[in-house]
Structures are given as structure tokens and as C-alpha cells.
């Protein structure tokens, strides 16, 4: 599992959201950036095309900045600065916990159905997964290293047993696809045409099979982090979505397919808008090193 990162990215429309980094591969990007309230007055929820650790303010660099800026300041000013920094840290930690307490159960809901746990096992596992995500979330005040995979697996085995652990880890390899189906389910629920359990399972298979059909490797002639690489990735996502909708017509009702298509189109337009925004930004300032990002699918 990749650790999450929270950092400031791009500003496009009203709203304050954060960005979180997870997943691997082209269609399951490493960066999903969210903005906590108060840190960005104008932001899109985004997934980072090429997350760059150097762009994230580490706890050490933040402390170095404080020391460097406080050399010539009075003790009272320094104390006020430290208190303000502590308040920001506490607010960020509170926001991260609230956000992940809401998101993790939703992201894992369909996967846990397939795992067949008891109610107490599921509740304990979700609590662990929330704490694990919090520990792996990188902010200005936390490195987000979290525990290593061996320790994580051992902790999960303590909750659900060794046999279920192997099943969980196998299912978790497709967590991005589980999330996608859950997002579709949430959107269709709002439209009054929710997926049945059978439709969820069949749609999940389509999403997984479609992802496996598409070569997610970046072509050798494209430089990671370049505008061309971002554009290639967005084209791949559009193609992936097109194939999913095409195949989903055998699983979903006509009305459901229509809503999924409209949802995908809306996301495609948002991604196209941010691509043009990035191009214009780079044209205006070629030395700008802001990480390239694009709107996430989470509605």
C-alpha cells in the first residue's frame, strides 16, 4: 500500500478540499490530492499525475523555516509563532482523522462484503484501517511513513486470522477498482437507480478486466512528470472509462448506463479543463514546478 500525502496543489474553483496520494499505475494514480479547510480557498479535489516528494513540506523543513525566520525576532513573537504552528498541526490532524473516518469505510465497503467477516471483526478491521491510513498520511507535520507491510499484515492477522488475511490482501490488490464501483454505486443511489449486489459484482469484474487490458506503463519516449505524460494518462483514463461503459451495458439498465456515461463525461471535461489550465500555467511560467494533477473521480 502506498502512503498518502496531503499538500497544496492547484487552484481552480471555489471550495476547500485536500489531496491524498494512493495506488499505483496509470489508471490508479499515485496521487489524489485533497485540501483541508483553511489551507486552500480555491481548489479541485485532484489526483496527482506524478507526485513529487520534494514539493511537500516535511516536518523538518517546516521547523527549519521557523528557526531561520525567527533569528532576529523577540521571544514573544517566537512563542506566538510556535503556538500558531501547534494550532495548525492540531487542526490538520483533526481534519485528517475526520476525513478518513468518513472515507475508509466507504472505500472498503464492497471489499469487506466479499471478505465475509463477522460484525465485530469488520468493525475492528475498519478501525485499524482508519488508523493505518492516518499514520500513512503525509502532511506538513507528519512524514506519513506509517508501519511496514510485514507489521501491517501481522496486525490485520490478529484481527481476522491468517486465512482471512491472505484473502484480504488479494482483494486489496484491486482496491482502486472496488472504490470505482463504490463511487458508481453512490452516484446511482443518488439518482434512485442503485446497483443490485449482482450488478456490483459483475461491474467490479468488468472494471478489473478492463484495467488489465490497458497497458498502464508510460511510453519510453515520454518523460515522467511532463505535460505529455499527463495528457497520455488522461487519454488512458478516457479510454478505460469508454470500455467500461461499453461492457457495462450488458450488466446495467439503460438508465443506469446513461447516468454512468454522464458521470464519466463530466469527469472527462473536468480533466480536460485542468490539462488546459496546466498548459497555460506552464506557458506563462516555464519554471513553475507545481506537481501536475487532475480532478479525482470521487463525487
Image: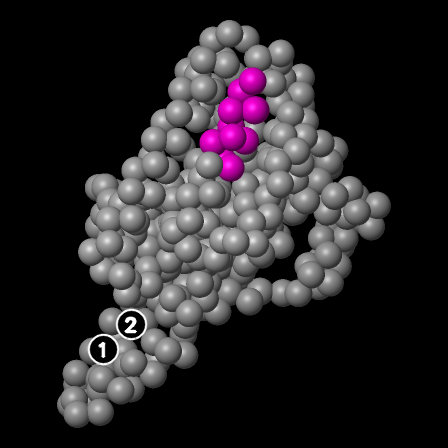
Q: Residue at (49%, 13%) from the top-left corner?
A: 256
Magenta-drawn stretch contains 212: no
In this view, the residue farthest toward the bottom is 72
Residue 280 drawn above or below residue 190: below
Which residue position holds label 1? 81
Q: Measuring 56% from the left and 18% from the top, which residue is drawn there?
A: 246
Q: Secondary structure at mark 1?
A: helix
State whether residue 40 appears in this view: no
Q: What coloring was used for the rendering?
A: one colour
* Quarter of the rendering occupied by the C terminus: top left
Q: Which range of residues does the magenta coloring cover?
A: 236-246
Q: Residue at x 53, y 61 (%)?
A: 135
Q: Closest to the observer: 281 or 6?
A: 281
Q: Quadrant of the N terminus?
A: bottom right
> Alpha-carbon distance for marks 2 and 1?
6 Å
Quadrant of residue 170 in the image? top right
Q: Is residue 165 above or below residue 8?
A: above
Residue pictured at 25% horizontal, 71% vertical: 84
Discs 2, 1 touching: Cβ within 8 Å: yes
Amino acid at each position: 500500500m502506498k502512503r498518502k500525502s496531503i499538500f497544496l496543489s492547484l487552484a481552480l474553483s471555489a471550495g476547500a478540499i485536500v489531496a491524498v496520494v494512493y495506488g499505483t499505475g496509470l489508471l490508479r494514480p499515485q496521487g489524489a490530492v485533497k485540501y483541508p479547510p483553511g489551507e486552500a480557498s480555491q481548489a479541485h479535489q485532484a489526483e496527482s499525475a506524478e507526485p513529487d516528494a520534494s514539493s511537500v513540506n516535511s516536518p523538518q523543513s517546516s521547523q527549519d523555516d521557523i528557526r531561520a525566520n525567527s533569528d532576529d525576532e523577540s521571544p514573544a513573537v517566537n512563542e506566538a509563532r510556535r503556538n500558531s504552528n501547534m494550532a495548525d498541526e492540531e487542526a490538520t490532524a483533526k481534519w485528517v482523522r475526520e476525513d478518513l473516518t468518513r472515507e475508509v469505510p466507504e472505500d472498503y465497503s464492497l471489499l469487506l462484503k466479499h471478505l465475509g467477516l463477522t460484525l465485530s471483526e469488520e468493525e475492528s478491521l475498519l478501525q485499524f484501517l482508519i488508523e493505518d491510513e492516518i499514520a500513512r498520511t503525509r502532511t506538513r507535520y507528519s512524514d506519513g511513513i506509517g508501519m511496514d507491510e510485514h507489521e501491517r499484515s501481522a496486525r490485520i492477522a490478529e484481527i481476522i486470522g491468517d486465512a482471512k488475511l491472505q484473502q484480504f490482501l488479494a482483494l486489496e490488490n484491486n482496491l482502486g477498482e472496488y472504490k470505482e464501483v463504490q463511487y458508481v454505486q453512490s452516484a446511482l443511489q443518488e439518482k434512485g437507480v442503485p446497483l443490485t449486489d449482482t450488478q456490483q459484482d459483475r461491474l467490479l469484474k468488468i472494471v478489473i478486466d478492463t484495467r488489465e487490458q490497458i497497458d498502464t506503463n508510460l511510453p519510453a519516449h515520454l518523460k515522467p512528470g511532463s505535460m505529455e505524460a499527463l495528457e497520455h494518462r488522461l487519454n488512458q483514463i478516457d479510454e478505460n472509462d469508454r470500455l467500461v461503459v461499453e461492457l457495462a451495458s450488458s450488466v446495467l439498465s439503460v438508465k443506469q448506463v446513461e447516468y454512468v456515461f454522464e458521470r464519466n463525461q463530466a469527469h472527462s471535461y473536468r480533466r480536460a479543463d485542468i490539462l488546459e489550465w496546466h498548459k497555460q500555467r506552464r506557458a506563462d511560467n516555464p519554471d513553475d514546478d507545481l506537481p501536475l494533477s487532475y480532478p479525482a473521480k470521487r463525487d
